[in-house]
Amino acid sequence: MTSGHDDLRATLLDAVGPSGWRDPADAAGMTVDFRGMFSGTPVAIVRPGSVDEVRAVVRACAAAGVAIVTQGGHTSLSGGSVPTEDRPSVLLSTSRMTHIVSVDPARSTITVEAGCTIEQVQQAALAVDRQLGMDWGARGTATVGGAVSTNAGGLNVLRYGPTRDSVVGLEAVLADGEVFDGLRALRKDNTGYDLKHLFIGGEGSLGVVTRVVLKLHPRQDHHRTFFAPLAELEHVHELYDRACALDQPGLTAFELVPEAGVAGTIESFGVARPTDTRSDWYLLGRFSGTSPVDDTVATFLSDAVGAGLLLDAVVADTAAQEENLWVLRDELPPETLFDAKGAKFDAAVPIDRVAEYQRAAEAVAAELCGDAGHVYSFGHLGDGNLHLYVVTSLERGSRMDPALVDEVQAAIDRLTWDMGGTVSAEHGVGQELLERVAGQKSAVELDMMRRVKAALDPDDLFNPGRGAHCAPDPGPEED
Ligand SMILES: Cc1cc2nc3c(=O)[nH]c(=O)nc-3n(C[C@H](O)[C@H](O)[C@H](O)COP(=O)(O)OP(=O)(O)OC[C@H]3O[C@@H](n4cnc5c(N)ncnc54)[C@H](O)[C@@H]3O)c2cc1C
């Protein structure tokens, strides 16, 4: 796959220089995905340092008929940022495009290169007394370009929406090497199609995002994080309603944490158990504001405990206690805790149906896996977004029978669609969800996506074979 491209490699090296060149043999971490599910050997790995270098790479690859797969922090977990195996491809990493271009507190915007990490932008915003809305566990590695391309959500979606809501403008290099300059930092512009949105959630299929203007918000220095064992999972929606009624704009996190996750995090990371009162499920929430929110938190928790919705509650008093609580959420994917492989879902359902969804998934697991079936879920309750894993053992290194994984996946995907949900609420479709996303898209929707792709990237230069538009045609509708 890598032979026969010496001329292209020479042109690319000339375009990006030695500091923009990585030998694929020394970059194993870039050619295999996080979970080892997808891998590919690229013709070359380039790390352009500017928009002009990206253009030169795109033009050279287009002329040679070699595809480009763009990689940011490589944290998306769905095989979208791994080189292709079925077609020669160049891996374009944005790891040298890490400049904060400008910060504009008066307009509450920040302009950054696509390879900046989320944490880097958060820090730059705080330095001018502003705050970035985007935040999640992979903040130190995930990049702005990757977040835009997967429309990442995270811990603050409740308050600030997904990445789409934070993007004010963007710039991208197109398949013919031209630059789409959509960097205008306007909050309103009613002049036709808002083309930047094609790149948001586009999974790198329409171009290389090079710079982005992001919205900033007033800095919220007052936070109160709480952790509370639930009396019943079924109470989560009522709790959410109560929290919103008290202070919806101040509710910046509302997360579900299972006891198995708490126990696993304590064992693996040595954090303290926040409360002696145990439950199958815990609520990890946070209120934030520009002034103290202590009264809001106290009212919410005491009313909820009084109403029998929560068994108990603790509120973090110090930064260390707060950090301790967030470790219980940030470290949760079971891969990092007990490495048990099974069927995995990053699904979302309407927010009032989360408990019903969990219970229905438990019923599916019981039916298909018997007593061994265990449904391990955590996630963003306020977005209806659950990371749900069905495993047949919580033992480290255990693996579920692949045929059973397929059966469970098909049954829970059907459940997700029937409940008006989606099989991909995070991480994108990548290569992993192609078959599964087909079941929730109509033929018309898929056709529209493919026509957009064909119009902007007629030779399928960018990220071929991945993203929702590559899903197979949906089958005939069942009666
Ligand atoms: C511990 C952990 C927690 C996470 N939590 C969340 C969460 O709460 N919410 C959530 O939504 N996601 C979450 N994720 C997933 C992931 O962090 C996000 O999808 C993130 O936005 C991916 O960014 P990245 O830079 O790593 O992109 P990559 O993984 O490198 O790429 C993702 C996709 O974007 C494309 N791409 C990357 N950069 C560009 C660019 N400049 N131009 C064009 N295309 C590009 C790639 O080709 C690929 O298709 C989590 C991941 C981990 C490991």
Image (cartoon, rainbow, N blue to C red):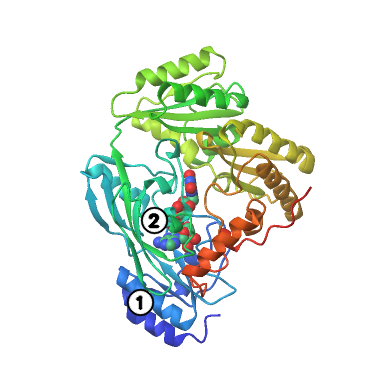
* Residue that numbered label 1 is attached to: 56
> From the viewer's perspective, is 370 left or right of 247?
right
Label 1 near ligand 1 (CB < 8 Å)? no
In percent of the image, x 55 and y 37: which residue is there? 384
Q: Nearer the viewer, residue 24 or 168?
A: 168
Instruction: Give x and y (percent) for residue 111.
Output: 28, 54
Classed neighbour count for the residue bearing mark 2: other residues with Cα under 10 Å, few (<14), some (14–19), many (≥20): few
Q: Residue 324 occupies which quadrant of the picture?
A: top left
Q: Give the answer, above or below, for where 60 lies relative to 454.
A: below
Q: Position of residue 24 (x, y in %)?
A: 46, 73
18 or 110, which lies in front? 110
Q: Amino acid at mark 1?
A: Ala
- Against 74, residue 186 (above or below) is above
Work out whether residue 185 or residue 370 is closer to the camera in this orientation and state it: 185
Label 2 with label 1: CB-CB less than 8 Å: no
| Residue 259 coordinates in the image, percent (x, y) | 59, 32
- Which one is closest to the eye, mark 2 or mark 1? 2
Tell me the tag on residue 346: none
What whole-number distance in Å separates the C-alpha atoms at marks 2 and 1? 30 Å
Query: Going by the image, does 146 lie left or right of 403?
Result: left
The amino acid marked with disc number 2 is Gly
- The residue at which mark 2 appears reads as 192
Q: What residue appears at the point 63 percent right and 41 percent down from the top-left corner?
A: 420
Locate the N terminus and report the quarter of the image it occupies. Answer: bottom right
Residue 197 shows in this picture: yes
Label 1 neighbourhood size at 10 Å, few (<14), some (14-19), many (20+)?
some
Q: Secondary structure at mark 2?
A: loop
**Is disc 1 placed on a helix, strand or loop?**
helix
Above or below for 109 versus 322: below
Who's the residue at 51% across and 26% down the image? 240
On the image, the x and y values in percent for residue 25 come to 48, 74
